[in-house]
Amino acid sequence: MDIETLLTNALREAGYGQDAIGSAMPRILRILEAEDVRIEMGRALSRKEREYVRLQLELGLSVREVVAGLKK
């Protein structure tokens, strides 16, 4: 089972409707991807780095690509 399915089921069980889940899911997934970047880097990110990560994820880059960009 993938993360989106798990989150959808958990939110549905918590009483959220399909419209709320559908509109919130992209943001929730980006937050989790940003946390994956932080874990891969092994440290807290600066404000500038967090902004970079947010923009890169919104553009559709993968966690691996964002981490590579930060390590340059």
Image: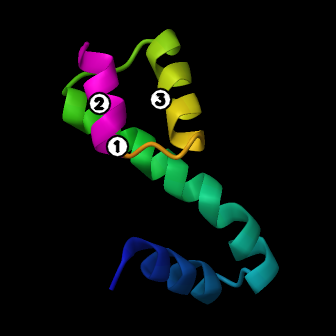
Is 15 or 71 nearer to us in this picture?
Answer: 71
Outermost residue on the right side: it is 19
**Residue beneath label 2, please?**
67
Image quadrant assignment for residue 19: bottom right
Could you tell me if the residues under marks 1 and 2 are in contact, i.e. CB atoms within 8 Å?
Answer: yes
Numbered badge on residue 53: 3
Residue 39 at what x, y percent from top left?
25, 37
Q: Secondary structure under badge 1?
A: helix
Inspect the image, locate mark 1, and give the three-letter code of the amino acid beneath it.
Val
Inspect the image, locate mark 2, and give the three-letter code of the amino acid beneath it.
Val
**Position of 20 relative to 17 (above/below):** above
Mark 2 neighbour class, 10 Å CA radius: few under 14, some 14 to 19, many 20 or more: some
Residue 64 at what x, y percent from top left?
27, 41
Q: Quadrant of the N terminus?
A: bottom left
Q: Is residue 20 visible?
A: yes
User: What type of secondary structure mainly makes up the magenta span?
Assistant: helix
Q: Residue at x 38, y 41 (%)?
A: 35
Could you tell me if the residues under marks 1 and 3 are in contact, i.e. CB atoms within 8 Å?
Answer: no
Q: CA distance from mark 1 to mark 2?
A: 6 Å
Q: Residue at x 38, y 46 (%)?
A: 62
**Residue beneath label 1, please?**
63
Write the start and end of the magenta stretch as one range. Answer: 63-72
Q: Is residue 65 within the magenta segment?
A: yes
Tell which circle, 3 or 2, labels the residue nearer the N-terminal end: 3
Q: Quadrant of the C terminus?
A: top left
Residue 48 at what x, y percent from top left?
51, 11
Q: CA distance from mark 1 to mark 3?
A: 9 Å
Could you tell me if the residues under marks 3 and 2 are in contact, i.e. CB atoms within 8 Å?
Answer: no
Q: Is residue 70 within the magenta segment?
A: yes
Q: Secondary structure under badge 3?
A: helix
